[in-house]
């Protein structure tokens, strides 16, 4: 497998060299990055690069090569306003978080939104409609969708497979002479009898940079026993930017023999959630720190790894062993860490509860108590784990007991089905009932969803943890930002803040003088905006606006106002 990967890398290198001048830059400013390809994000790998836009919006965005616009999407979350351009060389470029499209594209999108009576659209565009040339302005940069600040999200994808590729392999003007930075080593016991530093739990060791090399602070010889794995906390940085970016190449050797490696230069969106097996997920949930594993869980199907029969797991019986990690970025800048471990036996008490039920990664798993049922499908787990369950009483705000299903440090690759028996739930509230998860630290509930059926609330969950039943009877809140006392306070537009206390916003519909009106929705700021359009509404008269906002529990709020425009 290693040989195949090497041949593929060589061939890819020839292809990249030949295409270096094929693409021009999507922005005509120095390209400084705030995010890199395959960077570690919540539940997914980052599928492109994030290009800084000088802290603002409205910069011209250009087509990077000849082609045609194949897709246009508009969403209150995700990429927000996004364009997709197919190129003759078999790639597709993607431009996300745009502020607005070029005039012709904007008119087409708006017409489609009014035809579909929906702000959210995902349009498959005929190839003849919007041909583009390299360097054509197609949009303005923005902050739409789930963006955390103004920037351009940019991707290169394989058109046929739709897999994202590393844009830094394609000759864009991004400078990087900065090697990855290493922060901390994590050593993880991987069996009931394993221990690290004579304890059956993971141990972290700070990493320092001394005399041009990375070292485990104090250069200890780490005592281990049984199968253990190593993980590293690290980031990459690019020239001219202090933003933390991702590592896309890593190898591990034991006593000079490579036992693990990965190369992340492309991936499938279907595989992106395997990030929760690529990192030490429990540590991320506990501390917010992402440690990259140098071993492969048996249920991890990411096709990026090369390794020998150990899968990166150290399972030596005795002796002292030299461990070396090497991390590289897309430009070949590298950093390494070398440290020593010694196998030392000491009997320790297992951290596994005696009453635990073992759930298998390669089978369907189920659990049933008197008041809770859980069905975990095959393929949802990355490795076997010891499942525990506890039921506890709740407060008056809940309509069930608390059900603690293992804990939220166990990720699920695909959803599991949960059924919770409702308690003291009035008939008139049955259709308002939903499942909530409880934050392990704050105890705050967040809506999961679900529906009432035969005395239980049923739904799907994406992680384990604490769940219960609540009801949502409170309608969304609508606050006007542009109408006061029957008068407009903003001439070109009308804006509202909307919010919901539990189940979340399901739909928004605005009507102006009885006709559907387009309200742009930015979910991260809870802001909806209508821009007045002379081509669709008559000006110079009194208008009647009706705005309806519905949450997922079907609670409805209606706002009505008259104004002159």
Image: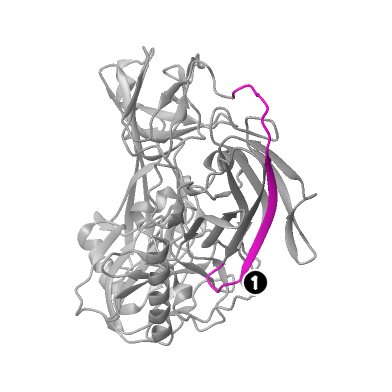
Horizontally, is 240 left or right of 280 in the view? right
x then y, percent, for residue 273: 41, 49
* Colour treatment of the image: one colour
Look at mark 1 in the image and give the residue it sits on: 178
x then y, percent, for residue 541: 32, 64
Q: Quadrant of residue 180?
A: bottom right
x then y, percent, for residue 93: 36, 73
Residue 62 visible in image:
no
339 is within the stretch colored magenta? yes
Question: Depth check: 47 or 55 in front?
Answer: 47
533 is within the stretch colored magenta? no
Rendered position, 369 above or below 332: above
x then y, percent, for residue 532: 36, 66
Question: Depth check: 361 or 157 in front?
Answer: 361
Identify the residue shown where x is 19% and y is 73%.
126
Rendered position, 250 above or below 446: below
Q: Quadrant of residue 211?
A: bottom right
Question: Depth check: 345 or 158 in front?
Answer: 345
Secondary element at tag 1 = loop
Image quadrant in which the C terminus is located: bottom left
Question: Depth check: 57 or 252 in front?
Answer: 252
Identify the residue shown where x is 28% and y is 73%.
107
- Residue range in magenta is 329-350
């Amino acid at each position: 497998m290693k040989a195949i990967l090497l041949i593929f890398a060589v061939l890819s290198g020839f292809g990249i060299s030949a295409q270096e001048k094929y693409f021009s830059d999507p922005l005509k400013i120095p390209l400084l990055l705030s995010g890199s390809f395959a960077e570690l994000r919540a539940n997914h790998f980052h599928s492109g690069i994030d290009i800084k836009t000088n802290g603002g919006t409205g910069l011209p965005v250009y087509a990077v090569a000849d082609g045609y616009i194949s897709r246009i999407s508009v969403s209150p979350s995700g990429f927000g306003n996004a364009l997709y351009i197919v190129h003759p060389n078999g790639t597709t470029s993607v431009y996300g978080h745009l502020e607005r499209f070029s005039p012709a594209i904007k008119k087409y999108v708006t017409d489609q939104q009014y035809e579909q009576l929906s702000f959210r659209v995902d349009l498959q565009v005929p190839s003849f409609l919007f041909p583009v040339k390299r360097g054509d302005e197609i949009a303005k940069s923005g902050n739409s969708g789930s963006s955390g600040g103004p920037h351009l999200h940019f991707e290169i994808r394989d058109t046929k497979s739709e897999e994202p590729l590393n844009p830094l392999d394609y000759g864009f003007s991004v400078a990087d002479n900065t090697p990855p930075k290493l922060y901390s080593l994590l050593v993880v016991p991987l069996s009931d009898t394993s221990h690290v530093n004579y304890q059956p739990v993971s141990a972290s060791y700070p990493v320092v940079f001394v005399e041009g090399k990375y070292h485990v602070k104090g250069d200890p010889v780490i005592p281990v026993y049984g199968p253990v794995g190593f993980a590293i906390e690290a980031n990459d940085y690019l020239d001219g930017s202090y933003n933390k970016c991702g590592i896309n190449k890593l190898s591990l050797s034991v006593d000079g023999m490579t036992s693990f490696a990965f190369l992340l230069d492309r991936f499938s969106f279907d595989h992106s959630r395997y990030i929760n097996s690529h990192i030490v997920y429990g540590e991320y949930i506990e501390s917010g720190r992402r440690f990259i594993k140098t071993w492969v869980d048996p249920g991890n199907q990411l096709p990026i790894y090369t390794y020998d029969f150990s899968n990166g797991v150290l399972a030596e019986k005795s002796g002292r062993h030299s461990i070396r990690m090497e991390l590289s970025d897309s430009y070949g800048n590298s950093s390494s860490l070398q440290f020593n471990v010694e196998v030392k036996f000491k009997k320790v008490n297992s951290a596994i509860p005696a009453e635990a039920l073992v759930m298998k990664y390669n089978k369907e798993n189920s659990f049933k108590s008197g008041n809770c049922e859980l069905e975990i499908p095959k393929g949802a787990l990355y490795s076997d784990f010891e499942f525990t369950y506890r039921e506890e009483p709740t407060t008056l705000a809940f309509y069930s007991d608390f059900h603690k299903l293992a804990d939220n440090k166990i990720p699920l690759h695909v959803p599991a089905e949960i059924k919770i028996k409702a308690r003291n739930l009035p008939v008139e509230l049955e259709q308002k009932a939903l499942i909530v998860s409880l934050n392990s630290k704050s105890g705050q509930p967040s809506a999961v969803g679900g529906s009432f059926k035969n005395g239980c609330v049923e739904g799907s969950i994406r992680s384990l943890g604490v769940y219960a039943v609540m009801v949502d009877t409170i309608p969304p809140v609508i606050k006007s930002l542009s109408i006061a006392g029957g008068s407009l306070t903003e001439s070109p537009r009308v804006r509202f803040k909307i919010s919901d206390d539990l189940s979340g916003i399901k739909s928004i519909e605005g009507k102006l003088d009885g006709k559907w009106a387009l309200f742009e929705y930015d979910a991260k700021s809870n802001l909806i905006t209508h821009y007045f359009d002379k081509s669709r509404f008559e000006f110079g008269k009194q208008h009647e606006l009706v705005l309806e906002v519905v949450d997922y529990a079907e609670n409805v709020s209606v706002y009505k106002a008259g104004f002159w425009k």
